[in-house]
Image (cartoon, rainbow, N blue to C red):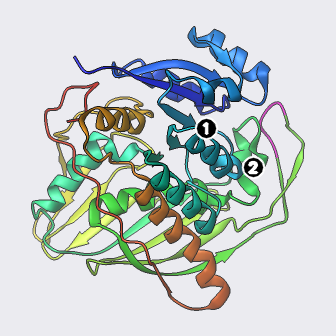
Amino acid sequence: MVERVGIGFIGCGNISAAYLKAAAGFPILDIRGVADLNADAANARAAEFGLKAQSIDAMLADPSIEIIVNLTIPKAHVEVGLQAVAAGKHVHSEKPLGISTAEARKLVEAAKAKGVRLGSAPDTFFGGAHQTSRKLIDEGAIGTPIAGTAFFMCPGHERWHPNPGFYYLDGGGPMLDMGPYYVTDLVNLLGPVARVAGVATKLRDERLVTSEPLNGTRIPVEVATHVAGTLQFVSGAVVTIAMSFDVPRHQHSPIELYGSAGSILVPDPNHFGGDIKLATASDDWQTVPTQHGYADGNFRVIGVADMAEAIRTGRPHRASGDLALHALEVMEAFQRSSDTGEHITIASRPERPAALPVGVAIGALG
């Protein structure tokens, strides 16, 4: 049996519960504790899951903890990540890896210099629906990928999130919040991005919160809330994308890819499963069975489990820091393109993450 890997969580906000619930399904993960600058938040989450609450300093000094899962707010991702790297810990961060490519690159370089692994959400591209979609594309089900579309559009997170202010500050906005799911999955499906063109707009300077407990509060908006543009991939495929917190309703599919022999509808990359549909010029849309596991449920810690398994076996982990840095560079390029009126060439060229095998048991990665 593979030796378990000690894990510590820094950040006990809204998303931490999903991670901690999912962790129970991966035997390789040994959750050693949770920490937060807000001790009450750490204590509450620890009590909920039967874990130990620690200070951040105590967690970083604990030799039984090998991986720090960084679930702090986006502005703190790099700062906390650098502290963990300096302590000799491997780090898996919530998305985005940083609020700018420049600061995130410092974290990537620090991890490489220290000889520790760096990874980042999203890990939903591990999901069965996305892995089967990739397999179909790789096997030529749509021929040569030519073009596609990717859409996430909603009225904003202030309708449901208990503390939505950070979504509208530097490091937030629809592209840095939801774009990681779409850009990362597109790289999983098509390979890296070569260049970007975009337009970014902001509908208003403040938003009215309608969720509890801040219902009626107005929050400032510092970032673009509607971002649209085009990604040209190294492979030559061209994908139109729109990420928005300003659209009440729409009927676009999350991801559609069009090839020389057919088209594929890829389900929501914020989820692990969903219906995959294929069509050709002569045949209408048909639902295709999902061949891979991790399609039925929320496995939002699978990237951490993959890193843990990779540490023990010596292979590369899939949700890598290089992949996350590439996604961030791509997302940042939309604002740069909007500001300059120019195409932005993407410098990074990460390895496409290894595909998951068909038939791997839940709780393992292969």
Badge 2: residue crowd in 10 Å (few <14, some 14–19, many ≥20): some
* Image quadrant assignment for residue 46: top right
| Nearest to the observer: residue 256 or residue 174 | 174
Q: Can you say whether 240 is above or below 34 in the image?
A: below
The amino acid marked with disc number 2 is: Phe
What residue is at 85 percent from the left and 36 percent from the top? 214
Magenta residues? 209-213
Residue 230 in the magenta stretch? The answer is no
> Which residue bears the numbered disc 1?
71
Pick the front one: 286 or 48: 48
Which SS type dominates the magenta stretch? loop
Question: Splitting the image into 4 quarters, where does residue 339 fall?
Answer: bottom right
Give how far across and how far down residue 280 sits, in percent: 14, 67
CA–CA distance between discs 1 and 2?
14 Å
Q: Position of residue 191 (x, y in %)?
A: 29, 67
Q: Please name whichever residue, 8 or 149, is drawn nearer the observer in this view of the structure.
A: 8
Left-right relation of 75 to 204: left
- Residue occupying image coordinates x 60% and y 54%: 177
Which is more N-terminal, label 2 or label 1? 1
Q: Please check the rendered image and state whether residue 210 is part of the magenta-colored stretch, yes or no.
A: yes
Q: Secondary structure at mark 1?
A: loop
Please name the amino acid that badge 1 sits on.
Leu
Q: Which residue is mark 2?
A: 166
Q: Nearer the viewer, residue 318 or 204?
A: 318
